Image (cartoon, rainbow, N blue to C red):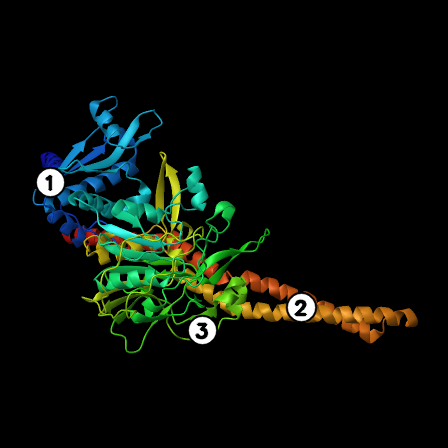
Amino acid sequence: MFNQQISRSAYRIIMLVLLAVLFLAVNMFSNVAFRSARIDLTEHGLYTMSEGTKEVVSQLDEPVTLRFFYSEKLATDYGRIRNYAGHVRDLLEEMRAESNGKLRLEVIEPEPFSEEEDLAMSLGLKGAPTQSGDIIYFGLVGTNSVDGLEAIPFFTDEREQYLEYDIARMIQNLSRPERPVLGIVTNLPLDTGSGGLMSAMRGDSLPFMIYDELQNRFQIEFLEQQFQKVPDSVDVLMVAHPRPLDRPTLYAIDQFVMRGGHVLAFVDPHSEVSLTAGPNGEPVRGYTEQSDLGPLLESWGVHYDPSRIVGDRELAQRVQTGFDARRQESDYVLWLAVPRDNVDTDDLVTADVSRLNLGTAGYFTPLEGATTSFTPLVMTSEDAQTYDVEYVKKGPRPDDLIRGFEPTGERYAIAARLSGPVTSAFDGAPQEAPVAEAGASQPRRSQEKAGPHIASSRKDANIIVFADSDIFDDRFWVRTDSYLGERVAQPIADNAVFILSAIDNLMGSNELISLRARDKADRPFTVVGNLRRNAERRFLAEQEALERKIENAEKSLTELQTGGASDSAASGGPSEEESVAIRQFRAELLESRKKLRDVQRDLRRDVERLGANLRFINIALVPLLLAILALGAAFYRYRRRKARVKRGA
């Protein structure tokens, strides 16, 4: 019996040792054989390489070298960097495998005071200092065969959702001998940012973040707002809230489309981007509030009214109201937060747009009998109405807008794609303006002459129009921080995604569009938002009625007290009926004020109840269910073991 127990113990020990050896062997084998095998269970496929990236790397004609600088030993104590570095390296390995040998990858560990560290610094990489004084490098440098160089100085957390796009864009930029040309006609301070031209002259301006993105992707060519021809070198023309354009300039844009050029146009009935972008928060010099392209839009088959602004109660952004200690938040129906449900997910431009933050926007409608097809890209909800721009200029309060809101039940197209044959908006080239007398100021105009008049487009047009210019404004879509002396953008909306995707699409380069937008850190709480919105609609009417009741009670009380004062002088005091009425009005006033306080507290009642329920589920209910399941499993095993003992006996 004793020997039998020893043999059983030895058998168990041997089995445990063999299982441990097998476990280590399987792990070592899987690390080697299945290094690139992954299962991506995230909602938006955050760790799955897109088809667009595969096209970019598989179509490389010339070799591209990527050098991944990573201080692996120094980053051992920093789990966040270590995990992120594993993600970067796996992605680079996948790209190399898809490149048919055209993509070369070098992994370099720049140890302190080494030649590799000097190389990293010379290539423009930024190091992050640690508490011990060492420097961690975590960046990427790409080069091609013609001395082209692109770099990601440091992989920051804020850009992790754009990791694949950043690397794929670097590879595509290195694969092109010349970047495509983007022509820009605008009255927005894209290249100077807040402060305008005066800040740029002082050297302290910060361009809009979207302009930095455009510079990284395209060769920018600004056109004067008076020109006779769009240069042939321009691949895509972006017209972004221009000043009123004269007929020769409109004709130049018209003929650019007739020649087969592609246009991305932003017009706005009430642009807010330049209202606060000048010195000390003032309007930019030469600011224009409205923009329109007049006959061009009609010739393209679309109607646009620059005197109408669209508001949407369902898509309203939350803004702060009040200037005292009781600062509150309220829905502002003129500023829209457009979710994914309100964009065309079948179009390449908006397929990956999850959210757009817009200011006071206009809308488009298709013209009857137009030769172009009108495809809405960004739409309002049915809970929308339009406002006259003069009313909006008066600055109505958010609560007033909600109280007076009267939805039309119609959805309005804020952005649309226009495709198909178009005819010229002009019968011929406009006559040259008469030469001004000597000494008179003359606007500067491009000297490039227009060619022969083209009456109809040589091929189907491809035009995207957008009825808002505040989409460019940093405050609507991005938070910026300074990191190691560099501006780092943390997107909170996909405004830049839309603009860059639209330009890429019009350029004929669709490879990167599918990977621009990954999951966002700022994800809306849809259920909470709907509860809050419904509560506010329900209680605003009750609040307004109580406020009127309080006002009437105070008025009646004042009249009684004033009238009673004059009567009491003669009679020695107010009558008993007046005293009863005064007490009744005071009681009614106190009760109404109490109800008003209750209504104001109830505005967040449903949201707080939802939060309490979620806390109970997460903290108590789920652990309780797990404990019950564990006890049930233990009891089941106990019963089975007891049954086996009885059968053995």
Q: Residue furthest top?
A: 113
Q: Earlier in the sequence, mark 3 or mark 1?
A: 1
Say which element carries label 1. loop
Pointer 1 local density, CA inside 10 Å: few below 14, some 14–19, many at least 20: some
Badge 1 amino acid: Pro
Q: Residue furthest front?
A: 438
Say which element carries label 3. loop
Say whether residue 137 is left or right of residue 591: left
Q: Position of residue 168 (x, y in %)?
A: 20, 46
Asked whether residue 153 is in view, the answer is yes
Q: Residue furthest left?
A: 100
Gap between marks 3 and 1, in whole Å?
58 Å
Q: Nearer the viewer, residue 10 or 450?
A: 450
Residue at 77% across / 71% down in the picture? 559
Q: Nearer the viewer, residue 431 or 483?
A: 431
Circle 1 is placed at which residue position? Answer: 63
Residue 407 is labelled as 3
Q: Is residue 150 above or below residue 515?
A: above
Say which element carries label 2. helix
Residue 550 is labelled as 2
Q: Is residue 48 above or below residue 331?
A: above
Q: Nearer the viewer, residue 111 or 478?
A: 478
Q: Position of residue 180 (x, y in %)?
A: 22, 50
Q: Earlier in the sequence, mark 1 or mark 2?
A: 1
Quarter of the figure that contains the N terminus? top left
Q: Position of residue 215 (x, y in %)?
A: 29, 45
Badge 2 amino acid: Ile
Badge 3 amino acid: Pro
Gap between marks 2 and 3, in whole Å?
30 Å
Give the total of numbered labels. Answer: 3
Residue at 21% across / 62% down in the picture? 259
